[in-house]
Structure formats: structure tokens, C-alpha cells
Amino acid sequence: MVELGIALVAGLFYGLAIGIIPAAGATTGLVALYGVIPYFLDYPMAGVVFLMAVVAASTTADSFTSILLGIPGSNSSAATIVDGFPLARKGQASYAISAAITTSTVNGLIWGILVFLFLPYYGQVLLSLGVPELWAFTVLSLLTVGFVSTSNRVRSLFAIAAGLIVGAIGVDPNTNAERFTLGWMYLEDGIQLMPVVAGLFAIPELISGFKLTPAGRVNAKENQQQVLQGMKDSWRYRWDSLRGGAIGAVVGLLPGLGGAISDWISYASTVAAHPTEKFGNGNIKGVIGPEGSNNAQKATSMITTVLFAIPGAPFAAVLLGLFMYLNFEMGSPDLLNNIEFFRSMALGFLVATVLVAIVSYLFIPTISRISQVPYQYYFPILIVLIVWSCLQYTGGWEDIVMLLIFSVLGIAMKHFQFSRPAFLIAFILSERVENMTIQITSLYSVADLLVRPVFLALIGIFIGLLFLNYKLKLKIDYS
Amino acid sequence: MKQLFTALVLALGIASTANADYTLVVPQKPGAGTSVWAQIVATELEKHLGEKIVIKHIPGARDIPGFNEFHNNLQQDDKTVMVSHGGNGVSFLEEKVDYNYAEYDSIGLMNLNIIAGKRKGDPMDKVRFASGSGMTPEALAMTMLICGPDKTVDQYIACFKEHVTWVNGMSGGERRLAFKRGELNGTRENPAAYKKHVESDSNAEVWFHHGILDANKGTHSDDPNYPGYQFEALFKKRWGVEPRGDFYNAYKLAKSFRDGLQKALWVRKGNPNTEKLRQALTAMANDPESRAKIEKDVGQYQWLIGSAGNGQRDALMKLITRQALSDLVKFNKLALGLESVFKENLIK
């Protein structure tokens, strides 16, 4: 029992640190643990608790960086920047972080409980969704670009087209022939997500940070009031929070979509749900909407991972390997009967979710002061951490070149007001939409599709969304 | 408890890559099949090598860039070891790659098998199968099983197009789910993954396997884990004759390079650490605890260490003939739609 407690606390603080490091996140944090996991062989359940605590804590803590610095704490918290950072600039950092932490915690708990309590029973639900439903959901996700575009239609379309083209760099899935690589072999695997997110969102904000005057000082009492107000508002706008959580949960269930998209879809749905309001200038709903999605996505990603040994997201692929090293074979009947394993998973995820919230609430007033410190004092540290995060996958100089290229692109897009979120969503979904389209056309005829009610319902929503976007002309003040 | 504390200290910030002595270059992202295998081998090998091993992931299209990088730059480092897999073997035969097995020394390799599964009771006359890296042998085998003996390569290609829906653009996870849902009626896995993903599915059964390679004889024998399901045996049972001809030779070439080099460790020729690594690998392969961990990942298959690994490689090279290679390339291009190239330099 003692070792479980120690593992929990260690996972909590390690996850907290990983969450706060710019552009890092659960996947990066877990990759760095391969050298450590053998030490848990004598205490495998402590290992499970530790790993789940890392996932839960890093997913909640990534809001700090997004809100305070305007740079994503992880791939899956970029959308929080859009309204979170302007709030911090207005001296309301504690308010925004408190709302984000509360939303993350509530959704982490709701979806964590739903997942871990009924984990063995989700198999049939998952198997009832086929390629057509996944295709429809992917295309539906792509349509969310319409809700995160800027008011300039031409520039937005250009950003979407550019994202789709950059996402298509790599190999043609039909022929395995290289495509748009300019003969550079590195590009045949496509462009890695991390340098794109960091380049588009982190570096431009760091550069802009030099021009910004530090946010005004906020006294201790005001800070406490902000924390309380953040908690209250996350209850007040609970439907935005729960909608974001539900979207994240669905994305987590569908292998291949990944968390980097769920927060943007949730953000877009929040914008669509409040057509008369302005977003991008510090609307708290723009923080609450996307913040619950990544916690829910992490929880539901565990379903395919545990039941079928099929990772629901990149972090789950790494987790699968770490679990295997601890002699837990995902997808095996033995594991599904291992109550102690499920208890440890639930303990690690749920308790860490609560504890990281408590720790965060305690430190919000202190950490929020970062927004009062001029950027030049911590600029070099942030650059080092961003570069480190980008190097965790291939470790090659090419990733740094990509970071530089997308930093320049990000700065230019920000300056000329081309929508960076629209570019990112199109980039992430480009390959996915193409692959799913190949799959659906290979396996299904039109007649097959017409007898699938979920598919038809999704197509109905798809058409409704197109209409809504055309009719309401929803736009955000963020590029 | 002391170990646990050590783990926690490490976890809280000490980078595991610091002070590494050896590097295993893996051509995949963390979490992928060979990455997981390499991680387990690295951890077990460390115990017998007495030095720290780190993994360097160099992922890329069809896992080629990592191996190319080893060939062009990294092999000069005496403490860098390349980890390759069966897909690299198939790419070596039919794609433009820089790496060349003939130029390295084998530390050791695992001689594995790939098992194909199908939906229970399905006659498999109309196949729905996902494409993927290194899956050419499955395509060739199913074509022969469906279309029968004594056809020209062009006739087999036409038959494949008529009977097989070869689904591109599916990841491994998507393929497994699509098979469980019945959208695909065929799939394939390495033995350990087969147990996990197919054998545990009550609606699935063994379709065929490729057999265990004896590279010196250039033949395959039945896999004791799945007796009676070797391709050659099933073909004879269905069509009454042994498989033969150009198309079969192309199939044998592809499966030998894929399965005979399924998981392999390489260093440059003349590397002064070669013997030390081989000794450590031998000790690891004989250590029941280490062996059990690796077998859990890939199944119970034989390690060929040191000169035995080089022997396997050399025997495989001798299997390459002009006809077999050109037929393989032709099938890839015309049946699977891939951009394969015929490599004259591979013909001895």
C-alpha cells in the first residue's frame, strides 16, 4: 500500500512537471519513462498507478502553460490559448486557470469513472461502429475548421488548403510513392505534429511576448476571488464543459484521431453554441469548452487500448509498451479478469486527477504571477524546453528545421491573420480523411451505406453543420 | 522498496538517455511493434552487457529512413547497433534503399513466422484484406490459394484483382478492429500478436502461415505452433499438387526475406564490439527470464546469433534470382499498385 501511495505522488508530480513544460504532454512524458519502468517490475501495480497518474496529471496541468504563456502545454491543449491567454493578459490568469482546472477535473472524473467502472462492457459498442461511421466522424471533424476561421474568408480558405496540402506530404497511401517531399526522405513519413504545433503556436507567442508589457499585478485577495469565480463559472457553463468532455470521449474511442484534434472540435462547438458572443478576446467559455475534452479523451482512449490492445491515441501506444514491460498483456482474457489491475488503473487516474486539482488550486495564485514577469527572463528556458519536446520523437536535426519553418509560418500567419487553428485542424485530418475515404470506397457500396443509421445520422449533422456555418458566419478573433 | 525509490528519483527528472554506452537504432516511433521488441531486448541485454543501452528512434516512411541513416552515418560509431524488421527485408528487395545487409555483421536475429487469420467458416474465395508494410507475401500466398496452380504471373495478377479487395490506408489498429467487426475477412499477425488479436476472437480461425525458414536449404517447414496450416500443405490439400513455378518462387523470395530477417541486430563489419555484443546476446538468449520476456512479445522462436545470423543473411542473398525478383516487382506494381523497382545490383 505504501508503494502505491509513493508511486501515485511521484506520478502526480512528474505528470505535473511534464504538463507544464511547453509542447510536451502525456506522450512525451511516457516516452521518457522507458528507462525507469524496469524498476517497477517488483511492484507492477505501483507501476500501473504511477503511469496512470502521469497521464492524468500531465493532461490537467497542460492548461497552465497555455493560459499563462499563450503557448500550448501539449498538443491537446492548444485551443485553450485562444481565450485563455487574453484573460491572463487582462490580469485574470487565476480565473482562467481555475476554470480550466475545474473543467478538466470534472470531465476527467466523469469519464474516468465511466470508463474504469464499465471497461469490460464497451467492446460491443465499439465493434458496432465501422469504417463508414469513422469516415463520417472524421469528415465532420474537418468541418469544424469553419468555426475557427477568421473573418477573412479568402485567408481562411488559404489556411485550410495549406493545412490539407502540408498534411498530404509523405507517401501516397495507394501507391506508396513519395508525395510533395522534394526528394527529402525525412518528409516521406509526413511532418511530425510536435514541431508543427510548437512552431505555429509557441514560437510566435514567445516573439510577441517581447512586445507585451507584463500583466498588471493582482493582490492575494483578488487572486483568491478569481480562483473561486473560475470554479463557479465552470459550473455556470457546465453544458459547454460537458459537451467538450463528450466530444473528447468520442474522439478517444476512435483510434487514429488523437487528442490534438479533440480540443479544437470542442472549442469550435462552443463557438457554434454561442453565436452571438465574441471569442478570441478572453471569453471564459472558450476556456471551459475545450478544457474538458483532453481529459475525457485520455480516459476513453484506454478502452481500445485495454480491451483490444489497440492504442486509441499516440500516448496509449507508448503506454501499451510500458504495460507490456510490466507483464500486463493488453487485450488478453487474463487481464480482463485482473481486478487488481483495473483498480490500480482507476486509482492512478482518478486519484491523481483529484490530487492534481488540489495542488493546482493551491498554487494557482503563485504560478499566475508568471504572467507578471517580463518574457525575456524566461524566454531561453522556454526555447530549450520546446526544442527538447520536439526532439523526443525522432531526435533528428530535421525536427528542428521543421520547428524553424513552422515558426516562420506561424509568425507570418499571425501577422497576416491567417487562421492557425484552421491550418492545424486541416493538417491533422488531411491524411486521415484521405485514408478513410480509400477505406470506405474499397469496402462499401452506396447501397451498403444507406442501411447504416449511425452513418446517416452523422451525415445529417454534417449537412446541418455546413448550413449553420454558412448561415451564422461564425468567426473568432484569433489567428 | 529501495528499487522503487530509485525509480521515483529517476522518474522525477533524470534523463534516461544520459551516460548511455550503446545505442539501438530503431526505424519506428515509440510504441510500434519493433520499438517495443527493441525496448525489451535493450533492457534484458543491458544486464548481460554490463553497459547502458538507449533506444534512438528514427521513424520514417515504411521504416526505411532509420535504416538508411544507420547505413550512411551512424554505423561508423562502434557502439551503435541497428534494429531491423521483416518489412525492411521486403523493402530491400523491391524499393530504392541505401542499406545493404551484405555490408554488416549480424549480432543476432530471430527467425519468425507470420500467421494469417480469417473469419470462421469463410471459404475465402473473395478476400478483403488490409495492405501494409511488408504484406506482399500474404498477397502472393492468398493469390495462389485462391487461383490454383500452373498459371502465368499475368494470370495470377488478373485473378488477384478479381478476387481480392486490397484495402489501402489502414493502420495496424484499424486493421485489427475492421477484422473483428468483419469488414475485413482476412488479417495477419506475428505469432504473439496473433494469439492476442485473432486466436482470442471466437469468430476467427487460422487461415495459413508461411512456415519456418531453413535458409541453407531454401525451404520452409511447418510451424509447430500452428501445425497443418503451412501454405504449401494447404495448397497441396486444395489443388492436389505442390505449389511450383515462377509465381511461387517470387512468393518464396519475399517471405524468406521478410520472415528470415523479422527481428535482427546489425553492426558495421569490423566493429570491435561485435564479439562482446554477441556474447551478451547469447547469454541473454540462454537466460530463462529474459527469454520469457521476449517470447511473450513475439512468441517462441529461434535466435540465430553471430555467425549463424550472418549465415542466414548469406543464404537469403543466394535465393535472389532475376526471374523471382522481376516477378515480385511486377506483382507489386500491377496487382498491389506499388511503386516497386527492379534492382539489378541484387542479382548475383
Image: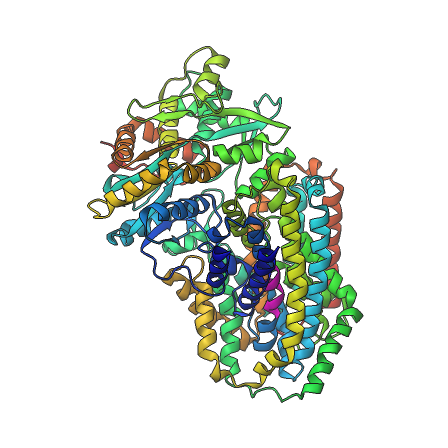
B211 sits to left or right of A124: left
With respect to residue A271, does A211 lie above or below?
Answer: below
Name the residue rendered at 38%, 34% in the picture: B258
Name the residue rendered at 41%, 40% in the picture: B290
Say if the magenta span includes residue A67.
Answer: no
A403 sits to left or right of A120: left
Residue A181 appears in view: no
Coloring scheme used? rainbow
A350 sits to left or right of A410: right
Most foreground residue, A304 or A213: A304
Q: Position of residue B175 (x, y in %)?
A: 56, 39
Q: Quadrant of residue A259 in the image?
A: bottom right
A309 sits to left or right of B82: right
With respect to residue B218, does A124 lie above or below?
Answer: below
With respect to residue B266, does A391 lie above or below?
Answer: below
Magenta stretch, main secondary structure, is helix
Specify the farthest residue to the right.
A236
With respect to residue A168, does A455 lie above or below?
Answer: above
Q: Which quadrant holds the C terminus of chain B?
A: top left
Residue A379 appears in view: yes
Most foreground residue, A369 or B7: B7
Q: Position of residue A106 (x, y in %)?
A: 72, 63
Q: Position of residue A7 (x, y in %)?
A: 57, 58
Q: Position of residue A369 (x, y in %)?
A: 59, 83
Most foreground residue, B176 or A120: A120
Magenta residues span A56-63
Say if the magenta span includes residue A59.
Answer: yes
Name the residue rendered at 28%, 49% in the picture: B71
Count numbered badges in the picture: 0
Most foreground residue, B286 or B208: B286
Q: Quadrant of residue B203 in the image?
A: top right
